Every structure is written in C-alpha cells, then in structure tokens.
Amino acid sequence: MAAAQRIVIENCSIATVDAHDTEYPSGYVVIAGNRIESLGAGRAPDGLENVVRRIDATGHLVTPGLVNTHHHFYQWITRGLATDHNLFGWLVALYPTWARIDEPMVYAAAQGSLAVMARGGVTTAMDHHYVYPRGSGDLSGAIIRAARETGVRFTLARGSMDRSEKDGGLPPDFAVETLDGALAATEETVERHHDSSFDAMTQIAVAPCSPFSVSTELLSRGAELARRLGVRLHTHGSETVEEEKFCHELFGMGPTDYFESTGWLGEDVWMAHCVHMNDSDIAAFARTGTGVAHCPSSNARLAAGIARVPDMLAAGVPVGLGVDGTASNESGELHTELRNALLINRLGAHREAALNARQALRLGTHGGARVLGRAREIGSLEPGKLADLVLWKLDTVAHASIADPVTALVFGAAAPVTASFVNGAQIVDNGRLLHVDEDAVARSTRAQAQRLARITAQG
Ligand SMILES: [Zn+2]
C-alpha cells in the first residue's frame, strides 16, 4: 500500500475538544490519509514525508467539524410556512403538503439542507426522514446520494409513522405507512446502506417519528429490530406540553416512562428536544445513557420551551445539537446554534451559569459524536481519529478584536469557513462547496418547492 499523503495545517489556534479541553494558541495539525496523525503547539515536526499540501492558517481557529444530530432535510422546500403556530398546529397545517413529496423533491431538499450546513462547518450530518408516501420513489437512496455528493459523513435515521387520525394520532390517514411495511422498509434500508466500520461515511438508525404519530407496537418492534441489526435508535421526545398531555391521556404516563416501557431508553438511543423533562426523567436518561439532540432555534420557533441542558450535562446525559427540520428553523445552520444554545439556556433557570462558550462548542462537536455513537472516531481532534475538521477565519473585522478564539466563534457573528475537511478530504473552500454547484442547488430547490406548492394546491 502506498504511504498515506499528508496535509499540514500550521500557525492556527486549535481547540481540540478532547477530554481535557486542550487548546493551543498557535499550533499545527497533520492529516495523514483520512486520519489525524499528530497535532500540538508550535510548528509541525520537520522531515515529514509525502506532504502534498501545507496550509498557513494564520488568523484561524481549527476545531473538530460540527456534528448535527437532528434534522428533516425534506422540509427545505416547505420553509416559511405556518410561521405563527405551536408544534401540533404547525404539524397539522403541513402534513397535507408533506404527504405529496416525491424523489426529485426530496433529493433537491437534501441538497439544499446539506449545502447550508456543510458550508457552515458541519462535517457529520443526519437526516430523520419519516414521510414515505406510497409510490414516491427511493427517498432514502436519494437522501444518501445527496450526502455522498456533498462529501459529509452521514447518518440517515429511517423514520416512519403508522398512527394516523383514525387511531388517535396526529397525521392524516394518507400520510402513514403500515406497521409491517415500515419495519420491512427500515430493515431493508439498514441492509443496503449501513456501514459499521470505523471510518463509515453512511450509517442508518431506526427512527419511528414520535409518540403521537406511531403505534406502541412500532416503537417496541422498532427497538427490537435495531438491536437485532446492531444500529442506533432515534425519535422525538418530550417536545411540548401538548405531547405530554397526549401521552398521559393515551398511555397513562409521561413520555419518558412511555419510552422506557417500549424499550426506548438506552445508550444506543438518542432523542430530539427533551424539553419537558422532570428530575426523574433526566435521571432515567443519565442512568441509561440515553442521548439528547438539543434544538434551541426550533424549540423557540414553535414556542416549545427551553430544554434543561445544564441539568442534563450535570447528570451526565450525552447532549448534542440539532438544527431540526427547516420548516421550524428556516436558517438550517448549525454553527449559529452554538450561540443560540448558549443564549437560550441563559434565559432558563441557571441564567449566566447555564453554559459557557467551551460547553457550547462541545455540544456541537464531541457531544454530537457521542449521541450518534461515533465518539471513538470523530468529535475531537486527537491522533488516530478521523480527519473531520474546520478552519474558522477569525481575523476579519467581524471577530479580530475578540482575543479568545473560542469566545469569538461562539459569541460572535457566524464565522466564515475557510476550509472544511471530512475523512481527510476538503469539502469547503472559502465558504463554497467544492463538490456541489450551490447556484444550481438554489435553482432546483426553488423549482421543487414551487412544484410541491402547485401539487398541494391542486389537492
Ligand atoms: Zn424534528
């Protein structure tokens, strides 16, 4: 085998987000193949062979790539609708539109979602896709293709819904799959696409949508399926007071107890939101190692509330950040969620002690890797880990007067990304995607959004 090619990045600040929060005011990173080979203070070691590129990163902060832990890519073409609703009102308003999606729409929407995240420093994306209208094509395949083309590492959470209005659920009857159909399609997606290797670019999780849109049997059989196949489990949980009320009325218990009764607490599970959690819910998550995808902008947009992130972290719950679908967070950016997570949590019970800049950066990197089950491979800059990292430009007028680079990144304006690497390969150069034509994506997402609106209007 040929010796790995090396890329040397020098003269940068580095925030490793390792277990000790090691930082270097001026240091270097050596990438060899798809791994981080070495990093440290000062200049890179002399005498390195096979160096194909040297990057003078003066004025930059290098961090691990951002990890997004909750999203719905298809919503990229239904942004800006039902803007003054809470969760249930917003869902009911949008289900009829969502039920009309097809493969070209989902592919374009995935491209748009991925483009905006990737050029903002996301190196690992996830998509929780749960709308599979009959005859709509290979939606999972289209989403995975878009992720491959963008160059990001990717987890597809294969979602499903089987509890429609006639069974007391929220989605209309035409928007759901059957229990057996959903389970079979999920298993097939895992068999076709899941890669369990250390440097996997595509992984699949089993992801029934939420307590109010799936049957108890789909939850429990989904958990069995995931454990038989050795993949992770994802869903929405404890997002709103209405959901809590729904669970008490239908199941006679709150969401966390309901999840526990269906096999849905465990270190192979992560849930989006977890806003309405009492002390015993948080203790149950901590005891079982269940992870949380904190989505501050979406929670604000839908007036859901403020998740108790400081309490979760104090209890030892793994917490990452999520954009959530862009029908409830039109920006679709994750780097701005570092700031939003910090600010929104300071409005909660812990006030100024809620989160600091380094905790926010950890949520968006190592925390995300943990909840996706990939903390051994990504989420921090350490020798032997995969080379997923971002060069943030902090020497322009937007940030240059802030002395501490991590403070500048989190508290300051959204920082420009000079370069972003995934698996040792560059995917962003000077804020532009290298492998996808952003202008073409802008045109196709607009065309598909208009097509969907037209089809929906025709009824
Ligand atoms: Zn969501």
Image (tube, grey):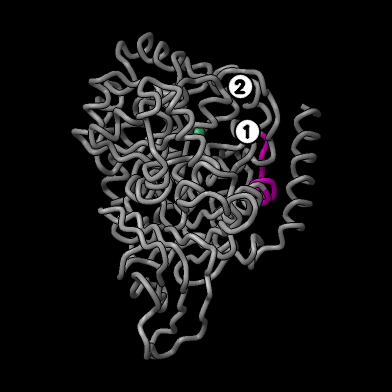
CB-based contact (under 8 Å), mark 1 and mark 2: yes
Q: Is residue 56 left or right of residue 371?
A: right
Q: Which of the two residues, 106 or 28, is positioned nearer the viewer here?
A: 28
Residue with the mark numbered 2: 90
Pick out the residue farthest to the left. Answer: 287
Q: Name the mark on residue 327.
A: 1
Under circle 1, the secondary element is: loop
Residues rendered magenta in the picture: 100-108
| Res 185 visible | no
Instruction: Give x and y (percent) for residue 353.
Output: 35, 29
Q: Quadrant of the N terminus?
A: bottom left
- Give the residue type at disc 1: Ala
Quick check: is 63 in the magenta stretch? Answer: no
Q: Earlier in the sequence, mark 1 or mark 2?
A: 2
Under circle 2, the secondary element is: helix
- Give the residue type at disc 2: Trp
Residue at 47%, 15% in the rendered image: 168
Q: Is residue 224 above or below residue 89?
A: below
Quick check: is 104 in the magenta stretch? Answer: yes
Instruction: Give x and y (percent) for residue 361.
Output: 42, 47
Q: Main secondary structure of the magenta part?
A: helix
**Residue 288 is drawn in which quadrant?**
top left
The crowding category of the residue bearing disc 2, from other C-alpha atoms within 10 Å (few below 14, some 14 to 19, many at least 20), is some
Residue at 43%, 52% in the rendered image: 188
Q: Is residue 99 left or right of residue 47?
A: right
**Residue 325 is drawn in which quadrant?**
top right
